[in-house]
C-alpha cells in the first residue's frame, strides 16, 4: 500500500495508519463545525490511502443511510443521496455489520446504482462499519477506478479510522448524528410539507421499515431456489389480486388505475424471466430479486422523465414485497394488533400496495419524505380517506416510534410531539370536520341550486362497477366520466366484444336511469397494456395515446364502440373521445360510430335509441378551433388536469413543477371562458371533469365563468354542493369578469375574500 506525508501528494515512509491517526486528531482539535470536520476527514483518508473516493454515510432513525461527506463523488449528492435500510453494498455493510471488499462492485447482486453520485466510473469498493459499543452509526467507504481487491493492510487502516470517526460522531459534534439527534427528537417541532390527501389526524408514530437484507447470495441448489422463487411470485400475485377486494377501495378515482398498473408489473413476463435467469446463474432467489431490482433501477434512473421515476418506486415496492415473502417475514403491517389504534405512519418512501398492508381501522395518517399529491401512494391514500403529507424533509430522523404527532393535511404541516394546547386545538378541529361530513350526507337529496336560482349538475367520475353505488350515496346527477380503460387493464388479454358489452351493460343498469358518459379507451402515457405492443416514447403523456391510437388502430376502437352500442340497446348512449387535438378527428370518429350502428341494424340487433358523441378538451390547440369543433359534437367535456399541465408545460406529477402554476390565473380562466361562450353560441352541453371541479373555490370560479355541469370524485360532491347552496352566482360572475378585465393576478385571494364576505365556508 502506498503511503503519504503531510501533503497528500508527497510520499513518506511513515505508516499510513499513524499518519491518518495524527491528522484526525489535528482535525478534531481545529475550530469549525462537525460537517467541516467530516469534509476534511474524507479528504485526508483519500489522500493517505491513495483512493479516488472516500465517503461517510451516517445511519438515520429508520435504518436508512445518508451520504454526509465525500471526496471524489459529486458534491451535490452529499445530504441528497439516501439509501434504504440494507440497500446496496453500503447498506449491506451497515445492516450486517461486516466489511465489504469488492474488486468490481457494479457486478455484485446488491450493488445499487445512484446516478447523482457519479460513481459509475469507479470499480473497486471497500466499506467498513462505523460502530461504537456494538451499535452501527454509519459506513466509511473508499473507491478506486482500478479493479482490485483491497489488501489486509488497507482494511485494517480503514477499520481503525472508522473507530476514530465513531468517537467524533457520538460526541455530538456533527448535527444530525449521534447524541445531537437524540436531543432533537425530544423536542416539539413543526415540519412543513405538501398536502397529499386531505384530512387531519392525531396519533402516534409507527416507522415503516419495508426492506429485507439479503445475507445468502449463492445458491446451493438452483432447482430448489427456482421452486422457492415460483412459489413466492405466485403468492405475490395472489396478494395483489386481493387488493381489489379491499373494502375501502370501492370509490371512483385514479387509485384503480394505479393499482392496476402496479399489478401488471407483478405479471410482467420479462421481469419473471430475468428473475429466473438470475437464479439459474447461481444466485439464491433473494439475491436474484435484489440483482434484477438494482439493474432495472439503474436503467430507469437514467431516464429524466418523472413517469419512469414513479414506475421505479413501484418496482422497488414490488421487489421489497417479494423479498418479504421469500423471507417469511411478519411485519407490524401483517400483525394489526402490533399497531396502535391511532397509527401515524412515517416513511422515507412508500409504494401504493405497501400502504394497503396496514390495517385501515388503525391507520389515521401518513407522512412521507418523498412524494407529491400526484404520487401513487397519495392517490391510494385519498381513496382510503387517510390524511397524508408528503415532502416532509427530515421527518424520519426527527421522530421515535411511539411519538405523538398531528398530521394537518389541510395546510401540509406535521406537528411532532405537540403541546397539550396544540392537541386540544386540533381535537376541536377534527370534531368540526366530522360534523361537516354529517352535514354533507344530509344534503344528498338536495338539488345543487344557488341562492339566485342557478342549477348546477354535479356528476361523479368512475371506472368500475364497484364505483357505481357512490352515484346514489353522493346524490350525484350522473356519471360525468366513466374510464373504460380499467376493464382493459384488469384483463390479461384484449377483452372480447361480449365481455366489454356485459361490463358496460352492468354500468348502465346500476346508473338507474341517470346519464353515464363513457370515455373511450385512453391507453398510452402512464397506462400501458402488457398485451398490447406500444413503441417506447420519450414523452408518453404527449405521445401515441387515446384517440390517436384508436384512429391508427381502428379495429381497437371499433370493437369498443360495438360493445358500447350493444350495451345501450334501446337506451341513450353517450360516448366521449379523449385527447382530441383537431376538430377533423371527430369526423373520423363519427364515421366509425355510424358504420358500426349500420352494421348492428343490418344484423337485426337493437340499437341505442340515441347516440351522443362528444369530445374531451385537453389539448390547448383545440381552443383555437372551437367554432369548427362545436359543429361536430353533441357535447364537450374539459379534462382540466391535462389541459392545465399542457397549457403551462408543467408535469403535474413532478413535485418540482406541478405546483408552479395556479389554475385560478387569468390565462386558464380566459381559456375556459372562451369555451363557455362557444358552447353557449352553438348550444352544446359543457362539463368540466377534473380536480378543479372537486375543489370548492375553483368550482365557484367555474360557475362564475358559466359552467353549469361539473364532474368530480364522489367525496367532493358534499363540499361543492354546500358552497353552491350559499353562492349568489350573479355576484360571483360579476366579480370574476371584473378581475379578468383588469388582469388581476391574485384571483384566488380575491375569491377567498368574496366567499368570506358572502358567508360561504370552504
Image (tube, rainbow, N blue to C red):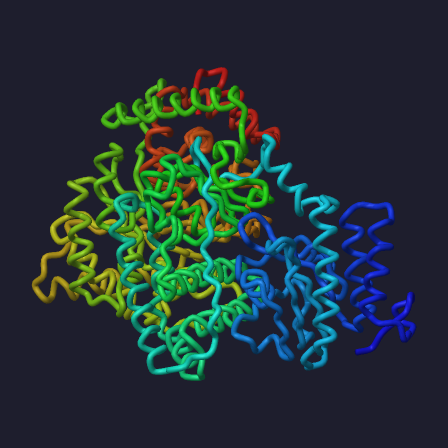
Placement of 669 over or under 94, stated as above or below: above
**Residue 660: quarter of image:** top right
Give the x, y percent position of residue 284: 42, 76
Q: Nearer the viewer, residue 107 or 114?
A: 107
Q: Quadrant of the C terminus?
A: top left
Q: Nearer the viewer, residue 114 or 310?
A: 114
Give the x, y percent position of residue 61: 56, 47
Q: Nearer the viewer, residue 461 or 229?
A: 229
Q: Residue at x 59, y 41 (%)?
A: 398
Q: Residue at x 63, y 37 (%)?
A: 184
Give the x, y percent position of residue 131: 64, 57
**Residue 344: quarter of image:** top left
Q: Residue at x 70, y 65 (%)?
A: 159
**Residue 185: quarter of image:** top right
**From where the camera sits, is residue 371 visible?**
yes
Placement of 14 over or under 652, stated as above or below: below
Q: How many marks?
A: 0
Q: Which residue is the extreme one toward the left?
A: 604
Amino acid at each position: 500500500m502506498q503511503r503519504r506525508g503531510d501533503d497528500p501528494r508527497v510520499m513518506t515512509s511513515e505508516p499510513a495508519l499513524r499518519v491518518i491517526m495524527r491528522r484526525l486528531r489535528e482535525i478534531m482539535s481545529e475550530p469549525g463545525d462537525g460537517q467541516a470536520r467530516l469534509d476534511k476527514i474524507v479528504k485526508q483518508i483519500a489522500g493517505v490511502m491513495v483512493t479516488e473516493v472516500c465517503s461517510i454515510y451516517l445511519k438515520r432513525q429508520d435504518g436508512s443511510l445518508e451520504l454526509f461527506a465525500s471526496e471524489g463523488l459529486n458534491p451535490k449528492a452529499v445530504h441528497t443521496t439516501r439509501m434504504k435500510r440494507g440497500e446496496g453494498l453500503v447498506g449491506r455493510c451497515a445492516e450486517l455489520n461486516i466489511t465489504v471488499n469488492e474488486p468490481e462492485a457494479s457486478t455484485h447482486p446488491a450493488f445499487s446504482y445512484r446516478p447523482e453520485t457519479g460513481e459509475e466510473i469507479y470499480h473497486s469498493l471497500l466499506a467498513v462499519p462505523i460502530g461504537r459499543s456494538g451499535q452501527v452509526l454509519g459506513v466509511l467507504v473508499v473507491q478506486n477506478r482500478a479493479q482490485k481487491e483491497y489488501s489486509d493492510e488497507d482494511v485494517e487502516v480503514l477499520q481503525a479510522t472508522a473507530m476514530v470517526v465513531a468517537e467524533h460522531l457520538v460526541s455530538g459534534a456533527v448535527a444530525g448524528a449521534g447524541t445531537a439527534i437524540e436531543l432533537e427528537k425530544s423536542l416539539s417541532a413543526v415540519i412543513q410539507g405538501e398536502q397529499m390527501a386531505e384530512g387531519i389526524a392525531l396519533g402516534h408514530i409507527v416507522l415503516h421499515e419495508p426492506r429485507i437484507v439479503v445475507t445468502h447470495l449463492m445458491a446451493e441448489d438452483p432447482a430448489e431456489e427456482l421452486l422457492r422463487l415460483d412459489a413466492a411470485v405466485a403468492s405475490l400475485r395472489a396478494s395483489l389480486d386481493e387488493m381489489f377486494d379491499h373494502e375501502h377501495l370501492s370509490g371512483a378515482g385514479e387509485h384503480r388505475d394505479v393499482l392496476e398498473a402496479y399489478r401488471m408489473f407483478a405479471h410482467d413476463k420479462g421481469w419473471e424471466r430475468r428473475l429466473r435467469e438470475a437464479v439459474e446463474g447461481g444466485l439464491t432467489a433473494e439475491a436474484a430479486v435484489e440483482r434484477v431490482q438494482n439493474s432495472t433501477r439503474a436503467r430507469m434512473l437514467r431516464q429524466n422523465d418523472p413517469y419512469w421515476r414513479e414506475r421505479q418506486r413501484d418496482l422497488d415496492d414490488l421487489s421489497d414485497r417479494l423479498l418479504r415473502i421469500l423471507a417469511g417475514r411478519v411485519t407490524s403491517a401483517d400483525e394489526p394488533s402490533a399497531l396502535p389504534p391511532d397509527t401515524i405512519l412515517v416513511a422515507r418512501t412508500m409504494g401504493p400496495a405497501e400502504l394497503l398492508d396496514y390495517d385501515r381501522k388503525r391507520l389515521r395518517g401518513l407522512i412521507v419524505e418523498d412524494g407529491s399529491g400526484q404520487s401513487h401512494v397519495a392517490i391510494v391514500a385519498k381513496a382510503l380517506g387517510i390524511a397524508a403529507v408528503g415532502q416532509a424533509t427530515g421527518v424520519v430522523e426527527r421522530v421515535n416510534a411511539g411519538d405523538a404527532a398531528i398530521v394537518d393535511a389541510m395546510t401540509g404541516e406535521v406537528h411532532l410531539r405537540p403541546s397539550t394546547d396544540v392537541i386540544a386545538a386540533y381535537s376541536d378541529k377534527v370534531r368540526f370536520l366530522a360534523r361537516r361530513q354529517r352535514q354533507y350526507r344530509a344534503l344528498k337529496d338536495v338539488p345543487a341550486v344557488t341562492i339566485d336560482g342557478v342549477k348546477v349538475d354535479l356528476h361523479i367520475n368512475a371506472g368500475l362497477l364497484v364505483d357505481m353505488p357512490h352515484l346514489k350515496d353522493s346524490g350525484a346527477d350522473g356519471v360525468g366520466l366513466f374510464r373504460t380503460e380499467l376493464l382493459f387493464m384488469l384483463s390479461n388479454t384484449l377483452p372480447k366484444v361480449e365481455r366489454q358489452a356485459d361490463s358496460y351493460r352492468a354500468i348502465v343498469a346500476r346508473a338507474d336511469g341517470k346519464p353515464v358518459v363513457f370515455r373511450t379507451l385512453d391507453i398510452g402515457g402512464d397506462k400501458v397494456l402488457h398485451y398490447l405492443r406500444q413503441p417506447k416514447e420519450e414523452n408518453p403523456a404527449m405521445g401515441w395515446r387515446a384517440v390517436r391510437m384508436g384512429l391508427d388502430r381502428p379495429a381497437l376502437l371499433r370493437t369498443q364502440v360495438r360493445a358500447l352500442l350493444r350495451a345501450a340497446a334501446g337506451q341513450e348512449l353517450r360516448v366521449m373521445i379523449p385527447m382530441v387535438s383537431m376538430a377533423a378527428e371527430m369526423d373520423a370518429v363519427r364515421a366509425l360510430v355510424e358504420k358500426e350502428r349500420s352494421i348492428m341494424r343490418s344484423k337485426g340487433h337493437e340499437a341505442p335509441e340515441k347516440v351522443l358523441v362528444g369530445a374531451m378538451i385537453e389539448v390547448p390547440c383545440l381552443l383555437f378551433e372551437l367554432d369548427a369543433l362545436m359543429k361536430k359534437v353533441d357535447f364537450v367535456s374539459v379534462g382540466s388536469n391535462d389541459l392545465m399541465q399542457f397549457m403551462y408545460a408543467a408535469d403535474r406529477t413532478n413535485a418540482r413543477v406541478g405546483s408552479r402554476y395556479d389554475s385560478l390565473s387569468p390565462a386558464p380562466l380566459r381559456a375556459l371562458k372562451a369555451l363557455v361562450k362557444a358552447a353557449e353560441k352553438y348550444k352544446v352541453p359543457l362539463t368540466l371533469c377534473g380536480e378543479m371541479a372537486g375543489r370548492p373555490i375553483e368550482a365557484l370560479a367555474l360557475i362564475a365563468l358559466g359552467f353549469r355541469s361539473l364532474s368530480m370524485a364522489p367525496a367532493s360532491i358534499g363540499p361543492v354542493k354546500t358552497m353552491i347552496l350559499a353562492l349568489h352566482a350573479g355576484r360571483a360572475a360579476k366579480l370574476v369578469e371584473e378581475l379578468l378585465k383588469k388582469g388581476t393576478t391574485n384571483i384566488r385571494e380575491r375569491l377567498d375574500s368574496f366567499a368570506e364576505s358572502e358567508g360561504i365556508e370552504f
